[in-house]
Amino acid sequence: KLLETCRRYFDKTGRRISYEYAMIDGVNDSREHALELARRCRGMNCHINLIPLNEVKERKTRRSREENIRDFKSILEKNRINVTVRREMGSDIDAACGQLRNNFMETSKTT
């Protein structure tokens, strides 16, 4: 339903759609997932931004391995889908998206 709405939006405005795709190990980062995403986006004027998941210790989910991200990107490119991998910033100091909030919540509980 979302993709149908995005196609209608593009038809009306001519503006490219950008999708943010969080890469989660073993959940949505397989070759099959990449092919499915490429199939669903075929013919759309869109850009996909692959985002390696920022790990938070209370969650069991993990970021995709580098080779999975690289392969996923390559599959999209071979299917003529515009794609980039988001540059990571702040995860080394637990200040990336999701991590900073979690640290703040932990600090608030102890004070």
Image (cartoon, rainbow, N blue to C red):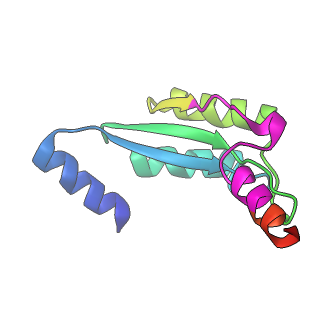
Q: Looking at the picture, how far across and down is residue 16, in whole percent?
A: 28, 37
Q: Looking at the picture, how far across and down is residue 70, in whole percent?
A: 71, 29
Image height check: is 77 above or below 13?
Answer: above
Which quadrant would residue 76 be assigned to in this image?
top right
Which quadrant would residue 46 be assigned to in this image?
top left
Magenta highlight on residue 97: yes
> Is 73 left, or right, of 53 in this rendering?
left
Magenta residues (range): 85-104
> Is 9 left, or right, of 55 in this rendering?
left
> Is 47 left, or right, of 16 in this rendering?
right
Q: Is residue 48 visible?
A: yes
Q: Quadrant of the N terminus?
A: bottom left
| Nearer to us in this view, 3 or 98 | 98
Which quadrant would residue 69 be assigned to in this image?
top right
| Nearer to us in this view, 50 or 97 | 97
Identify which residue is drawn at 80% across, 32% down: 67
Q: Residue furthest left?
A: 12
Q: Looking at the picture, how far across and down is residue 30, in whole percent?
A: 72, 48
